[in-house]
Amino acid sequence: MAESDADMSTIRFVHTVSEAGRLLPSASRWNSIEINFNLLPQSSAPGFDSLPSRFSKSFDFNLVITDRKYFKRFVIIVVAIVLAVTLLVLLLNFLPHKHNHHAYSKNLTLALNQALVFFDAQKSGYLPKNNSVKFRGDSGLHDGNTSSVETDLIGGFYDSGNNIKFSFPTAYTITLLSWTVIEYHQKYEDIGELEHVKDIIKWGADYLLKAFAPPNITSGLPPTLYSQASY
């Protein structure tokens, strides 16, 4: 049937995808790609597919599979490769990196050694020659000489890198360190830090003993406890 141009502009075309049984709506201009795998037996009778496409922007691709057995093998290999790559990515993301030297370190022996070296860096007074911190020298050699009664207050630890000594924080620290040696004596010995921590405890304890002056019967002085307070 012949149709006028006015009628053609209002017609809504429907394109049939061969061997799929689907109807696709289209406007007056149809853009489509049709792929035929030729998996179903072809009819010898002329039909709609034998007619040339009336849409200027339609493309027909005929992918012919000559052997279904090889096609199935191809599909299985592709699926296997995808699954293998996915499994490999998951393993790389979730397995621990044992040989990565830049990863988080759990060397607790090194952490404990560095913590004890901090106390070596905070020592005040006449330092031993084998002190592990080389930049620290003798300091605070006149502590106690400014009071009316000359007292030896040389030694102890500076507080958090400052040039000041606090008696109460020192007493608390030495108490906790002593407690850890009582509880984990064997652990300290196994990692070679037992004598190191004992030296730190003795250094702080000796200073605390100096900070307490017993009563002097001769001079009549009462017991004295030296401490440092900041404002």
Image (spheres, rainbow, N blue to C red):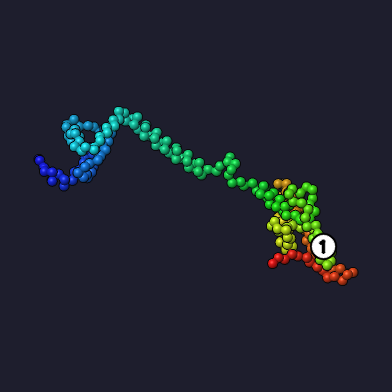
Name of the residue lying farthest toward the top: 66
Q: 61 or 181: nearer the eye? A: 61
Residue 119 image position (x, y, % from top left): 72, 54
* Residue, disc 1: 145
Q: Is residue 137 above or below residue 23?
A: below
Q: Residues within 10 Å of mark 1 (few under 14, many from 20)?
A: few
28 left or right of 99 in image: left
Name of the residue lying farthest toward the left: 1
Which of the 4 quarters of the picture holds residue 224?
A: bottom right
Q: How many marks?
A: 1
Q: 80 or 56: nearer the eye? A: 56
Residue 198 image position (x, y, % from top left): 76, 53
State which quarter of the image contains the N terminus.
top left
Residue 186 visible in the current orientation: no
Label 1 sits on what residue type?
Asn
Q: 10 or 22: nearer the eye? A: 10
Q: Is residue 85 above or below residue 217?
A: above
68 left or right of 142 in image: left
Residue 61 image position (x, y, % from top left): 27, 33
Residue 34 image position (x, y, % from top left): 26, 37
Residue 2 visible in the current orientation: yes
The structure residue drawn at horizontal position 81% and vertical position 64%, both measured from the top left corner, is 146
Which of the 4 quarters of the picture holds residue 171?
A: bottom right
The structure residue drawn at horizontal position 80% and vertical position 57%, both measured from the top left corner, is 141
Question: Which secondary structure, mark 1?
Answer: loop
The structure residue drawn at horizontal position 76% and vertical position 51%, both measured from the top left corner, is 137
The structure residue drawn at horizontal position 74% and vertical position 48%, both measured from the top left corner, is 134
State which quarter of the image contains the C terminus.
bottom right
Q: Is residue 140 above or below residue 147?
A: above
